[in-house]
Image (cartoon, grey):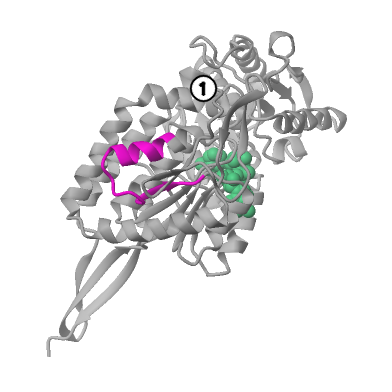
Amino acid sequence: MTTHEPVGLVVGGDRITASSVPHHEHIFPGTGGPNAIVAMAGSAEIDRAVACAWEAHREWAGFTVDRRRDLLIDLADVIHENLDELAALNVHDYAVPISFAGTAILLERFLRHFAGYADKPFGLSTPVAGSFDVNLVEREPYGVVGVIAPWNGALAVAGACVAPALAAGNAVVFKPSELAPLASLRFGELCLEAGLPPGLVNVVPAGPEGGEALVRHPGIRKIHFTGGGHTARAVVQAAAVNLTPVVAELGGKSAGIVFDDADLDAAAMLSAHQGPLMQSGQSCACASRLLVHGSVYDAFLERFSAVIDAAMVGDPFDTAVTFGPVISEGALDRIHGVIENAVHERAGVLLTGGKRIGGEYSRGYYIEPTVFGDVDNTSNLAQIETFGPVVSVIRFDDDADALRLANETPYGLNAFVHTRDLNRAHRVARALEAGSVWINTFSDISPQGPYGGYKQSGFGRTGGIDGLHEFLQTKNIRIGMG
Ligand code: TXE
């Protein structure tokens, strides 16, 4: 991919390669080598993108709803035609194995789902107590909204956020991470190719400075942020300047609960692929704590370890590879530090992994999938999001014990329940403090269901009617009838 020509921002109908801040040298995590030179957005480019967005919003507001619907479907069609290219760009972006890089299919699904809302009623009329006035409840777009995406799955965030924002009538300034800008920039180009008004979707990768300029911008009427809790605090503080509302989709330390009646083969397969093998554990949706009933602990661990050991490490572009590198040298060092501290603090027993993968992969940022057993749920290992291929396995005695352990975390994003007992599954699902509970299945995000966190995993939702309403504001209009 190494190109010497900088990859430009998508602002209005233009590609900006010479911006007001230094270019970013994109490093491919699989080799640690330079992959592309990418223009970054500074305050000047954010200002220009917001101005273009307001102009495009006015044009978009002048389109009939069926024309907006059809353009969103046209965009979904264009995404469909470019799924392979977008998957390859995901690999270039963050070295996710190509067999798991197909997040553009999510983008397409969200576009088709929310296109269906574009020509449906958003508001309603209501009676008025003590009067024959007409009362209208209207739901209107904000105008221009800012969407900030993490490096691990920007196209999924584009689907979950940009699609409903457009269907609701907004224009968008979309800021992917400086660490993974390539697929998002291509998405911006495809919006233009699909015939969307220039400026309706602006793609402006930037680091913290550009991100803060976007949040603080008086022309941004709502922010949707996806990322880590630390950054979310900075975003909320910056948004306070203009009292800009924020939706936050944050991290997790989700529990996978394996009950004594679970299908252990299925639970082991799901827990491995929903855990350390899912983007090398770099997904907010990971089950990073496995709570296992004592009576099946050894039998489960045997199966789980076998799935982990069968992971194929290698070149992320190789379709047989199921386990890739982590995002950066810094992330590798951070994750290695978590492992060393856990050993030092005796947080649990290191059962497998824990080392950087050398040999032919020594230049990449590879670290072995790592499993700790008999982990203390109050340890840092079990309480702090690692965002790497490290999982804690913890025994429990009974249902009450499992729920206590699962909920003893500041996070509340996902929870996974493995049992054949439907009553227990419902009972446990209702008692878990998590925004999404997955019973004997993967966290396969769909446009129909709301997704988001409890507690410090965030607030607000993407997906479904909740996800649409995040991009609408409500106005009440009362017409006096004399
Ligand atoms: O996050 P960061 P990353 C979470 C995941 C993990 C984190 C990893 O759990 O905690 O995201 O992604 C921009 N003002 N989720 O490392 O560092 C930054 O440039 C404005 C949860 O990318 O928080 C990037 O674009 N913006 C999610 C974005 O914020 C700023 C699914 C996120 O960066 C900024 C995926 C600032 N001051 C990952 N500083 C879910 N819940 O669905 C940085 N940024």
| Residue 350 lies within the magenta run | no
Mark 1 burial class by Cα count in 10 Å: few <14, some 14-19, many 20+: many
Q: Name the secondary structure under disc 1.
A: helix
Count up the numbered dots. Answer: 1
Estimate the x, y position of residue 414 in percent, counting from the top left.
53, 39
Q: Is residue 260 visible?
A: no
Residue at 33% x, 49% y: name it: 198
Estimate the x, y position of residue 367 in percent, counting from the top left.
70, 20
Asked if residue 50 lies left or right of residue 355, the reply is left
Front-most of residues 44 and 116: 44
Quadrant where ligand 1 appears? top right
Front-most of residues 200 and 402: 200
Q: Is residue 412 above or below residue 361?
A: below
Image quarter of residue 346 = top right
User: Label 1: which residue?
Assistant: 270
Estimate the x, y position of residue 35 in percent, counting from the top left.
59, 25
Residue at the extreme bottom of the image, as rendered: 482
| Residue 200 lies within the magenta run | yes
Residue at 67% x, 39% y: name it: 385
Front-most of residues 355 and 290: 355
Estimate the x, y position of residue 103 in percent, counting from the top left.
43, 30
Residue at 51% x, 31% y: name it: 417
Viewport quadrant of the C terminus: bottom left
Front-most of residues 417 and 456: 456
Give the residues in magenta. Answer: 186-204
